[in-house]
Amino acid sequence: MKHYLLFVTLFSSLSLSAQSLSSNRNHEIDSLRKKIKQQEVNEQYVKDLLSLCRLYNQRDLDSALYFADQAISMALQINDQEDLQKAYHQKGVVHYYQAEYSEALKDYFESSNIAKNLGDTSAWNVSIQNLGKAYEVQGEHERAYDYYQRGLELLNDSSSARLRALAYSNMANILFYKEQYEKSLAYHKKAISIRTKENQRNALAYSYNDIAIVYRTVGEIGQALRAYKDSYNILKKSNDQRGLTSVASNIAGLYIDMNKLDSALYYAQESYALATAIEARHELMGASSQLSNLYERKGDHKSALKYVRQSHDLYDSVFTQEKMREVALLETQVKFNEQKARNELLEEQRKAQEASMDKQLVVTISSLVISFLLIGVIMVFIKERLKQRELTKRLTAANELLQHQQSELALRNVEVKEHNELLNNLNEEKNHLIGVVAHDLRNPLTSALTLSQLLEVELEGDNQDCAKGVKNALLRMNEMITRILDVKAIEAGHMNLNMSSFDIDEVVENVVENCEHTAEKKGIHIIQKLKPVTVFADPNGVRQVLDNLLSNAIKFSPKDEKIEVEVKVCSEEQASVIIKDNGPGISKTDMKRMFGKFQRLSAKPTDGESSTGLGLSIAKKFIDAMKGDIVCESEEGKGSAFIVKVPLDIKKSVAS
């Protein structure tokens, strides 16, 4: 009951403040509406329509959309290209706020093309930034990254500070999704510096919110909370309800991580009230989900059920309808193509029948002429015709049998196609489920790791050992999640290889150095046989593969043994890295399946180490993608040798 009263009070205060702020806007809207009724259609008329659209953006999205459409129509009528570009831009913003992302993309594309044709680089860049944002919010991060990168390339000396800060901020956000946190923080700090210097208060608030998300992800909780509060205070002063909706939700999420549920509930209710007031469906969906989670943790299952149902309904309205439209469009196109193919087939059959009829007519006339000339030939002809009819019957029967078999084959093909589509859909659902589960585990796992590290520092004796054991278990879980996400990315074709020339002996030396501490615990001595060799591959991918193979060699080697690591040139086109151990070896059965996913081999680690069963599968796919190869030579009881082959840098070899 206490939380309910708090929520009602909060919602009422937000509504009153919105009414207070909107009084000035109402006066301005009324003045503009009276003005356009008395105006002729000219450039100023279109500009007034755009002003009405921007004013309605904060209170009535349907009215904003109406005035955007009016502005487009009038700009086309008087051929005002500059205002037409702005009108499409404003329409895209309205569709974005309505979570109609497909429509927003169409509007932004129109705006971008017009700005490009006008030679207005700044307006073109703004449209490109908006295209990236529309793809980003739908989870298409690679497309978003391409647009943000293009926006950075368009920046020049004449670009405004506002546009430059926008480009840096967007690039920082997409780098966060790509888990490049240091680069993300660097771009955020550039944007904050510009917006502070230019006194762009609202934009600065959004930058504080975005950098807080990165701080929270990397475990800098204090930094994250300070940045969130700075953003919140700025938006509160300017009464930016749309921005406050997102920031309040983020603060609630941070307090949930800190297990301060009452504080989290306060901000989550504020986010929900704001999203309701401005009819922001996407934000309302997130706020409903957050309130459901909070009420469930506080034991109020009735309220939790209410908000989870609302969240699901909103999710279906935002995303499912859009996908249904896309599917309907595809189905229409498929049906059109099928009908076109049937019509072409019928036309070919008609022409073939006409040709056959003409041929039969010629044969009949020729037969009559010959019959009048030679009666004897007529008898022979009749006999031959009888034979021909018998042959035709047999041929017809054979054709009917062939057609029946073709029909059955077509049915089988349709069934096979349906089964393949079903299997592909199930595989996509499986990959999506694995990705969602793995990503959702990341946040609580990060919180648990942070707490375990704090406990390890604070506790002593046996308690400290227990905390250390918990931390190690969580690190293994984090490694497993990373491996699962690697597999998902590989299967989805999202491997972003950075192919370049580098000295592979230096990478090997670095990998050995990182693994020496683990090897020393078991008394294992790593012998290096290195020589300078330059290859052309992805250095990070090669490092990950070699680290996995050397770690496996240490896991499966008995204590006080030796491991040999050798670099050499194995052909005119390839270099190889050989990692040889004296472990238990690999059986012939395991050799056949060792590069499959989730395959645990019969050999066991010698000191109780853990294994996910994904390492060799990921290593194989990485090396294959770099046009290399990875093979294993082993006999049971005599150790194993893994040979990684990667392409030489041919240009450097020829030059030397």
Image: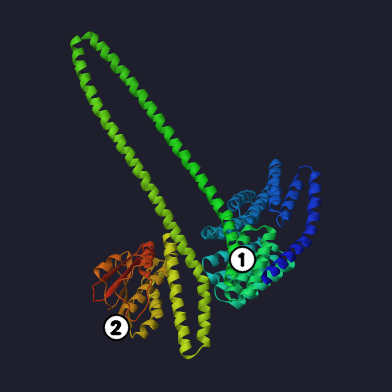
Q: Is residue 439 above or below residue 530?
A: above
**Depth check, front residue: 132 or 648:** 132
Q: Position of residue 581 (x, y in %)?
A: 29, 77
Determine the residue positioned at 62% across, 61% down. 283
* Image mark count: 2
Q: Is residue 92 above or below residue 246?
A: above
Q: Is residue 218 left or right of residue 635?
A: right
> Which of labels 2 and 1 is toward the front?
1
Q: Is residue 588 left or right of residue 337?
A: left
Determine the residue positioned at 42% across, 56% down. 426
Residue type at mark 1 is: Ser
Which quarter of the picture shows residue 261? bottom right
Which quarter of the picture shows residue 12? bottom right
Dot placed on the residue nearer the N-terminal end, 2 or 1:
1
Taking the image as drawn, is residue 199 in sight?
no
Which residue corresponds to mark 1?
303
Q: Residue furthest bottom?
A: 461
Q: Position of residue 50 (x, y in %)?
A: 72, 51
Residue type at mark 2 is: Glu
Label 1 SS: helix
Which residue corresponds to mark 2?
561
Q: Position of residue 390 (x, y in %)?
A: 22, 24
Whether residues under marks 2 and 1 lie with C-beta atoms below 8 angstroms apart, the answer is no
Q: Is residue 138 above or below residue 457?
A: above
The alpha-carbon separation of the residues under discs 2 and 1 comes to 61 Å
Taking the image as drawn, is residue 446 in sight?
yes
Q: Position of residue 302 (x, y in %)?
A: 60, 66
**Depth check, front residue: 615 or 504:** 615
Q: The C terminus appears in which quarter of the rendering?
A: bottom left
Label 2 SS: loop
